[in-house]
Image (tube, grey):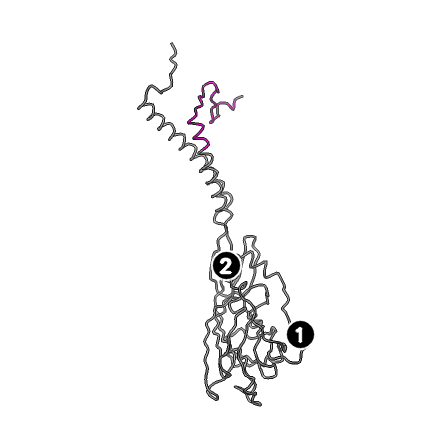
């Protein structure tokens, strides 16, 4: 065929090829090393990395949903929930959320800590958001309840604000609550901003604080960052995450307002966390081709050099050469 003239891979007849034991050993060693290196390259290709970018918040939302699920060691009729934002708009939340009489229990937060400390996996985050796990509600069958569980979601202005849970008669006009039942010991099961995703763990979820006196204030300072998660298949999750610092203060009567105070502020930037592979599939093929070809060529050259040195030192071991007459 005419294409033989273009053959860049000339063949060597098997009768002109000599196989040696050292060459066989080298082939096995090279093949084993190549397998390890190839598996490493494939692992790098399969490993995903998170790319972090900040953009100006593209969502023009005047309202934002806030989700709460908090248990306090006080009767429900001794508590009130309010919110006031920076525009001086005040919301009475006592009628917008559900107050459920219950017993105070402290649940283990081991699982939540494991989730918080685990490396971020965007795919798992998006899958968790799709799970609509129902929140446990306390039973109302017992009349001797000593605690109150506040559960609900409500709309508020997307402005800096202060949500607070206080004892009746403290901080607002009205009948003074009985000091004997005042106890700000609390457990936060859920506190999140935006659409409720019960399976996603937030910084304050499953946290617990024990009050040491009836007149004690717990202050939480939150910075809320709008966040967009994008996985490698381009699925998106729009949510909010926040950082928190806390402060507690005990005081005498008439020197302060006992309660829980959640002071939150919004960042004007949106954090975009996108999941990407460290290399494309084409890049992987190029790396594998260069790795396999280069390693075999390098090993073959090294074998020839070492053989030449060996036969120079010990010429009697050199193979006999045939000379054509």
238, above or below 234, in the image: below
29, above or below 200, in the image: above
Residue on which disc 2 sits: 118
Of the pair 231 and 159, the residue shown nearer to us: 231
Q: In which image quadrant can residue 62 be found? A: bottom right
Label count reads 2
Q: Give the image location of residue 146, x and y in percent.
A: 60, 80
Residue 19 among those drawn in magenta: yes
Q: Secondary structure at mark 1?
A: loop
36, above or below 194, in the image: above
Q: Secondary structure at mark 2?
A: loop
Of the pair 45 and 77, the residue shown nearer to us: 77
Residue 283 appearing in the image: no
The residue under the point 43% across, 33% down is 296
The residue under the point 51% across, 76% down is 210
Q: Nearer the viewer, mark 1 or mark 2?
A: 1
In which quadrant will I find the N terminus? Answer: top right
Find the magenta span and give its range: 2-28
294, above or below 248, in the image: above
Q: For mark 2, does the 10 Å Cα neighbourhood hold few (<14), some (14 to 19), or many (20 or more) residues? A: few
Residue on which disc 1 sits: 139
- State the separation of the CA atoms marked 1 and 2: 34 Å
Q: Give the image location of residue 28, x and y in percent.
A: 46, 32
Q: For mark 1, does the 10 Å Cα neighbourhood hold few (<14), some (14 to 19), or many (20 or more) residues? A: few
Question: Which residue is outermost to the top?
Answer: 325
The residue under the point 45% across, 23% down is 19
First of labels 1, 2 by sequence position: 2
Residue 228 among those drawn in magenta: no
Residue 125 appearing in the image: yes
In which quadrant will I find the C terminus? Answer: top left
Q: Give the image location of residue 47, x and y in percent.
A: 50, 49
Question: Which residue is outermost to the right?
Answer: 141
């Amino acid at each position: 065929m005419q294409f033989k003239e273009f053959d860049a891979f000339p063949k060597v007849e098997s009768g002109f090829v000599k196989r040696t034991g050292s060459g066989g050993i080298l082939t096995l060693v090279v093949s084993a090393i190549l397998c390890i290196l190839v598996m490493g390259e494939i692992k790098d290709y399969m490993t995903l990395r998170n790319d972090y970018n900040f953009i100006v918040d593209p969502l023009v939302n005047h309202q934002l949903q806030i989700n709460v699920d908090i248990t306090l060691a006080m009767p429900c009729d001794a508590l009130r929930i309010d919110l006031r934002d920076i525009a001086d708009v005040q919301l009475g939340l006592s009628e917008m959320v559900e107050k459920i009489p219950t017993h105070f229990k402290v649940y283990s937060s081991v699982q939540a800590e494991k989730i918080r400390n685990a490396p971020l996996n965007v795919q798992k985050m998006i899958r968790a958001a799709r799970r609509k796990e129902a929140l446990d509600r306390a039973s109302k069958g017992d009349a001797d309840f000593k605690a109150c569980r506040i559960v609900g979601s409500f709309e508020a202005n997307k402005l800096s604000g202060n949500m607070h849970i206080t004892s009746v008669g403290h901080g607002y006009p009205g009948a003074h609550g009985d000091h004997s039942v005042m106890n700000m010991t609390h457990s936060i099961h859920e506190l999140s901003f935006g659409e409720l995703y019960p399976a996603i763990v937030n910084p304050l979820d499953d946290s617990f604080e024990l009050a040491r006196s009836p007149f004690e204030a717990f202050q939480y300072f939150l910075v809320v960052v709008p966040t967009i998660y994008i996985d490698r298949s381009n699925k998106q999750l729009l949510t909010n995450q926040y950082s928190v610092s806390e402060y507690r203060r005990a005081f005498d009567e008439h020197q302060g307002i006992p309660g829980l105070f959640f002071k939150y502020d919004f960042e004007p930037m949106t954090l975009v966390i996108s999941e990407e592979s460290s290399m494309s599939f084409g890049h992987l093929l190029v790396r594998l081709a260069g790795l396999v070809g280069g390693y075999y060529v390098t090993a073959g050259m090294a074998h020839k050099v070492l053989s030449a040195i060996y036969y120079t030192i010990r010429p009697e071991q050199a193979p006999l050469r045939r000379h054509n007459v």
